[in-house]
Amino acid sequence: MSLNRRAFLAATALSSTRILGANDRLRCATIGTGNRGSYLTRQFKEFGAEMAAVCDVYEPRLEQGLTVASTGARSFGDYRRLLEDKSIDAVIIATPDHWHAQMLVDAVDAGKDVYVEKPLAHTIEDGFRMVEAVRRTKRVAQVGTQRRSYPLYQEAKRIIDSGVTGPIRLVNAWWINSLKSLNNRPLEGKLDWDLFLGPAPKRPLDPLRYFNWLHFYDYALGYPIGQAAHIADGVQWMMNSTYPVAVTCSSGKLNLEGGEIPETGSMSVEFPENYLLVFTLSYKAMRYRACNDQMQQFHGEKARFDLGRESYALYPQTTEVEVKASQERREPDTFDSADGLHIRHFLDCVRTRQEPNATIEMGQYTNVVCCMAVESSRKGRRVRWNAEEKRMES
């Protein structure tokens, strides 16, 4: 980085830092206004933030972002220009995964707090860059793993922490869904392809890659890994885990024409706390109502604890034919509320400067698991974590 660039970022950070009162309205901005980014923009606005700016490299999505932002919001094609706005307090990063790291580093260096979508990063090295930048600048950064702010999951955490299950040595988890084909739509407006690619390898303009970036290794780690960012994070939270010991992952054949990353896979994650997480995902199965599409089973010596998207149940050990729950809670169609609670918590932390529920380090714990799973799947062997050197070894 040049001296002039460092000076600019330092000056921007200093001028952007202001003391907020409880009644101050936060000025926020969204980088990446596709479906998820536009949804978050609406949510932030509902919880009192002024959505003062939006940014996207694709003109129709930029226009979509403007329709849900606050009146008078500014639009940007280049996120770096948005970060120059000294009145912006916080930014939402809802772009493809390969851009998360650089955008977060630039945002905190410019004095902004950050709400960054999961998975945290595209590589292990990028994740550690993000951790360093957040701690160096003392900004508030929350990862969008909204289960950590969902009351049902918080109650589940208290139950597991109580020790009622006895020691847990195995967690079985799965996520089942259905995806028929990739999106083959044509471009319908101007796209800054070079800016979309950013740190990814240079390629000719390809609408299929743009609209289906989650299916290509240049920009993401795929559905099995992207959804593991939800499940593994939840399990690591419940089990008080940080980094793994080793990961072994295998994938099925690719069944979505035009893609690159298999949509069916299974990973086995060894943790130093002496338990094994086995997570399996397929996006080529029958479709379930959301309340039934995923499960995490914590197999304790005294009881099994089942944790779904919107439910939990505790099953004590028994020799009876019928295994009955001693505690259960089921709240179908309430999981969407977790986003709002997570966002409100983040906005409170921006004002109070307290640590959020989903810190940047927590996001990195799971990012390491996810990146190791991809390495294992592509190389066909068990991948170990070198804790001392903070790198994987295969």
Image (cartoon, rainbow, N blue to C red):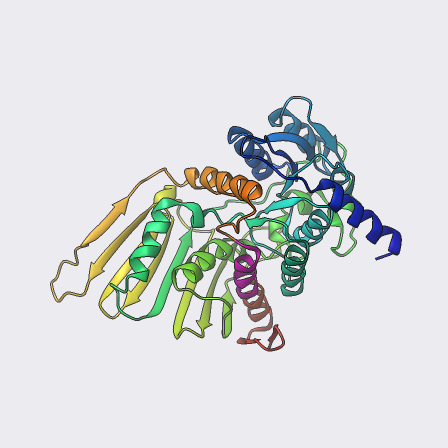
**Residue range of the region highlighted in magenta in the rendering:** 359-369
- Magenta segment: does it hold 365? yes
- x, y percent for residue 264: 49, 58
The number of numbered badges drawn on the structure is 0
Whether residue 226 is visible: yes
Residue drawn at x 60%, y 52% as measured from the top left: 215
Residue drawn at x 56%, y 71% as measured from the top left: 376
- In this picture, residue 261 sits left or right of residue 250: right
Q: Main secondary structure of the magenta part?
A: helix
Q: Is residue 368 above or below residue 350?
A: below
- Magenta segment: does it hold 218? no
Name the residue furthest left. Answer: 320
Q: Quadrant of the C terminus?
A: bottom right
Q: Nearer the viewer, residue 389 or 221?
A: 389
Q: Is residue 72 above or below residue 280?
A: above
Residue drawn at x 25%, y 70% as measured from the top left: 301
- x, y percent for residue 168: 32, 69
- x, y percent for residue 245: 50, 75
Whether residue 177 is visible: no
Q: Quadrant of residue 351?
A: top right
Q: Quadrant of the N terminus?
A: bottom right
- In this picture, residue 394 sits left or right of residue 265: right
Q: Nearer the viewer, residue 148 or 212?
A: 148
Q: Quadrant of residue 272?
A: bottom left
